Image (cartoon, helix red, strand yellow):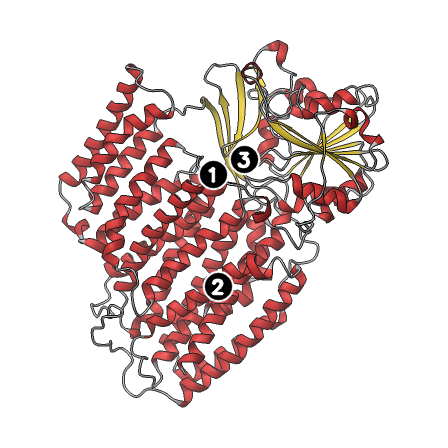
Amino acid sequence: MLAIYATTLFVSAFLMFLVQPMFGKMVLPLLGGSPAVWNTVVVFCQGSLLLGYLYAHVSARRLSIRPRALIQCLLVLLPLIVLPIKIPSGWSPPTAHNPGPWLLLVLLISVGPPFFVVSTISPMMQEWFARTRHRKAEDPYFLYAASNGGSMLGLLAYPLLVEPYFPLADQSWIWAAGYGLLIVLILACAVTVLKFPRAGPTDSHPAPSRELTPANSEPLTTGRRLRWVLWAFAPSSLMLSVTTYLSTNIAPVPLLWVIPLAVYLLTLILVFTRKRLIPHRIMVRAFPILVLPLVMVIILHSIQPVWLLVLLHLIAFFVIAMVCHGAIANDRPAPAHLTEFYLLVSLGGVMGGGFNALLAPLLFPTLVEYPLVVVLSAIFMAWAVRGEVSQLRWADMLLPAGLGILAAGMVLGTRVLQFGTGLSSVAIAFGLPLVLCYSLAGRPLRFGLGLGALLLVHGLLPGGEGRALLTERSFFGVHRVLLDPEGSYHILLHGRTLHGQQSLEASRRCEPLSYYHRTGPLGQLFAAFSSEDADWRVAAVGLGSGSIASYTKPGQQWTFYEIDPTVVRIASDPRYFTYLRDCGPGIEFVLGDARLSLAAESSRQFDLLVLDAYNSDSVPIHLITREALELYMDRVPGDGLLMFHISSQYLDLAPVLGNLGQDAGLVCLVQNDAVVSALEMALGKRPSTWVVMARTRAHLGKLAEDPRWQPLEGSPHDRVWTDSYSSIFSVLYWH
């Protein structure tokens, strides 16, 4: 009996977390690979989970076990009408406004029915098990670990076992087959609960055990219910905060979207097992030790070394989630309240995810939610450790305020005395206050408020990158326009990635800078064909600040493909950038995903197609596959050229393009323009890497004889990337 229930929970959770990355891969090409896609998918699944838990709770309260078992057996059959899972034919996202609502609607239609049914399984099967005669039925919470084990395995199985070997259509059928197995298991569970019911009430709780803390028999008060919600809110919000922070500020690698969720599930597994591997008190003590360096890293905006910072963020998140989830597990009620318990925990998870994915982009221009929830998690811990929130003292407010005043004084002192420069001055200013903050760790409320005071002081300081002229957040990320510290340039940043800059000198307004400098690879291409490009038709994927428009000439036709309306608005605003107004009047813009737009415009052809979408905060993999390259070559017939900008600190995409070019029979050249002098840097040039492709060597013109351009061959050890296969591991380097 135990094996049947554990397997049912395992399979249902496996399917639940396998479908999330699977559907994310289906929909990502339509939305440019933005991390917000993953966050929206996660929030939708959390909301569906909440509805499933609500159904399980209401049915347990209103119906006896026999009609409930019958209804559940019928309910699991309904999703068969929408399987296998797929995106509705002909659906495409809006191009002029936030695609978030569209994505939620697609999720509701495509994934909603089966996901809702699967989400009912965990609380319902545990409640059913509590009604059987099994000797462990009096405390069924340990089955939650089996459920989360299935969740974690499903999440990790997708990138390791499913995605590399099965096309998306086959993945959908595999998921449908797994759902068929789940139907059989549900029927088996229904038989056991009806045939072997336990005599007596189901609200008792077991004797104290050294393996799993016994269920808390205290009455269910409003305060206790609120604690469950808040303790569930913090890890859920932090999971998405860490995801967005890592993929935006440290490494724009989609792999990192899965890891925080895997850590989140691991903490649930560990705290709900019958034998705790890590005592809760150890995690409570580790909490301030990990949070303080995390806050320092956030204050310093550190991005190097990548591997160490990723580990720090993930380990700190693990400890915080272990503290919050451990508090939930320790405070779980008797089985009679099991469904309500899971419902409230799920509610907290939905609130945390919704706060990050839906509210935070509207409330905050930058990723403020991450440090904010770190502070809140410390405050929430006060309920778990001492209950000190109900014993508020003046010192709980005065000491954190004193820390903030000290930090502000230290900041002013380092600036007046010019004690250190850049990051070193920030480290000096906040070092002592953070050390003193640790002395408050014995009282979590004071500790959390102290962290909040320090982060508030830091938030009021101007950034070292320059004065912010504009900060705007969209579905696709955070965009900032800065005036550099010397007052010479306007700079466009997407997250922490440079997306273009422009000189403020009137004589240099139409001079392409950063990666697009005239002495760089792109400038060399236009110089090599200067006598032949008078009537060229040029298309560019990715707008940025509009720097590439500097190469326009009278008689040419230029088209920019850009997925984010915010970028078009910023690049077209002469208060920030004037490339489009002064250098390329008459340029056409096409909003939406470039691949979809190019596919829809079957009659359009170009002499040059510039792919400038691979140095972004989230590389859109669907723009660098065999199918994508075939589309590009259809749009640049004859002697047309493809130019790929692949500058990246984290991904070496040259081998991928080499394989694609060799697979398509194209000639490929690459140039890593990495050596940029101090004078060139001062004049606005930045290192960059570019790849050019053509059908024959003759079509490359003078570039074919330029020693700065080297042949790019395919790698026999790597597979060609397709819409169904891509491997970040093969191109990732950490430094």
Q: Which comes before the other along the chain, label 1 or label 2? A: 2
Q: Which comes before the other along the chain, label 3 or label 1? A: 1
Q: Which residue is mark 2?
A: 153
Question: Looking at this view, is 417 or 519 the one in front?
Answer: 519
Closer to the observer: label 3 or label 1? 3
Within 10 Å of disc 3 (Cα), the crowding (few <14, some 14-19, many 20+) is: some
Name the residue located 50 percent from the left edge and 59 percent from the top edge: 156
Q: Which residue is mark 3?
A: 649
- Judged from the image, the secondary structure of the residue bearing numbered disc 2 is helix
- Judged from the image, the secondary structure of the residue bearing numbered disc 3 is loop
Q: In x, y percent, where is residue 158?
A: 55, 59
Q: Which comes before the other along the chain, label 2 or label 3? A: 2
Q: Amino acid at mark 2?
A: Leu
Within 10 Å of disc 1 (Cα), the crowding (few <14, some 14-19, many 20+) is: many
Q: Quadrant of residue 397?
A: top left
Residue projecting furthest to the top = 507
Q: Quadrant of residue 306?
A: top left
Give the CA distance from mark 3 to mark 1.
Answer: 10 Å
In contact (CB < 8 Å): disc 3 and disc 1: no
Give the CA distance from mark 2 to mark 3.
Answer: 30 Å
Q: Which residue is mark 1?
A: 250
Question: Looking at this view, is 555 or 551 the one in front?
Answer: 551
Q: Is residue 299 left or right of residue 100?
A: left
Q: Amino acid at mark 3?
A: Gln
- Using the image, tell me which numbered label, if any, was put on residue 139: none
Q: Is residue 288 left or right of residue 155?
A: left
Closer to the observer: label 2 or label 3? 3
- Judged from the image, the secondary structure of the residue bearing numbered disc 1 is helix
Name the residue located 47 percent from the left edge and 43 percent from the top edge: 244
